[in-house]
Amino acid sequence: MHNLTGVFIKEEKKIKFEDIDLYCFSLVYPYRVRKYYTENFEDYQTWVADLKKVLEYENIEDQYELKDVLGKGKFGLVKLAIHKATGRKVAVKIIGKKNIEYSDLEMIKNEIEILKVCQHPHIIKLYDVFENSDFIYLITEYLEGGDLFSYLQKRNFKLPETRVANLIHQICIAVYYLNSYGIVHRDLKPENLVMTDNTEEAKVKILDFGLSKIIGPNELCHDPFGTIAYCAPEILLDQLYTKKVDSWSIGVITYLMLCGFLPFDHESSIKEIARKTVQDRTPFPIKAWKDLSEDARKFVDGNK
């Protein structure tokens, strides 16, 4: 008798043993694989069909038609797909499990759990999750505008202040929503913000919750996560920190959107970026800020 919790079925290639054809399938457990063989193809089909039913097995390609590659992430590809029943376009994040570290797998599971909780107009929607012995598939809404960095790049990093205020407001209410559930994103940056389309009225949504964490009302974090140019000083100083680190990242993103460059940056030295973030005051060069409002300046300088 075998406990099938967390087990996946995998159809294997037929083999020959002493001139006999053997049909093979595997049951993939978290820490081992068991292979089973039948001499009769009909028996093999029956076993596989019944096990798939018990395991509630679903093949992603039964429901979705996979299309072009949209991008490449840390753990695999993101592809465009079409839901066969409705014709709806979706994005499919394909994560290979073969060479992935256990800690990374935990991050992926964490992202899935957070996205299941989040239902907000400015947070990417998770429609479905498929998993087999080799891959995890995250089915999310497809947004045509690309990430915020590309959106800004197409406009030479020049947006009207009113437009910046509108987009930042959308990010802020989404972060407030996350924080109300105890979720700290910890990696807010233009590459993790996606636009609904490429027009001047496009809305922005937060994605990529791999580094996110759920913390209690009075709990502090100590994990050194984030992208250095957008990291709060307390993270760089290896200090305990709260959900407020997301607010710092929003300030840096706002500065970039208003000025076209980062407040604390260096061409080649990560250490120098960290030093500037921790030690320097927020720079407000006259050439970049002369046509911007005092309110904009106060907003980005709120934590410095």
Image: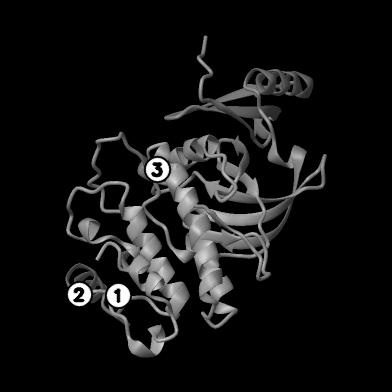
Q: In the depicted view, which residue is nearer to us: 26 or 170?
A: 170
Instruction: Identify the amino acid type marked 2.
Output: Asp
Which quarter of the figure is the C terminus placed in?
bottom left
Q: Is residue 23 visible?
A: yes
Task: Give the SS element for disc 3.
Answer: helix
Q: State the residue in front, 18 or 74.
A: 74
Q: Quadrant of residue 54?
A: top right
Counting residues from the start of the chain, the first of labels 2 and 1 encountered is 1
Position of residue 8 measured from the top left corner of the image (x, y, whole percent): 57, 29
The percent position of residue 245, horizontal first and vertical second, equals: 31, 54
Per the image, label 2 sits on a secondary structure element best described as: loop
| Residue annotated with mark 3 | 179
Q: Quadrant of residue 284?
A: bottom left
Measured from the top left, where is residue 263 in percent x and y?
33, 76
Q: Are marks 2 and 1 in contact (CB under 8 Å)?
A: yes
Seen in the picture, residue 122 relative to 13 is either above or below; the reply is below
Badge 2 density bin: few <14, some 14–19, many ≥20, Cα 10 Å? few
Where residue 64 appears, x then y in whole percent? Answer: 75, 44
Q: Quadrant of residue 43?
A: top right
Q: Please state which of residues 25 and 162 is positioned toward the viewer in this rendering.
A: 162
In space, the residues marked 3 and 2 are separated at their CA atoms by 28 Å
Mark 1 — residue? 264
Tell me, yes or no, whether the two marked residues, 1 and 3, touch with CB atoms within 8 Å. Answer: no
Considering only order in the chain, which callout, 2 or 3, is on the residue closer to the N terminus? Answer: 3
Q: Residue at x 68, y 31 (%)?
A: 58
Tag 1: residue type?
Phe
| Residue positioned 67% across, 69% down in the render | 198
Q: Which residue is mark 2?
A: 280
Q: CA distance from mark 2 to mark 1?
A: 8 Å
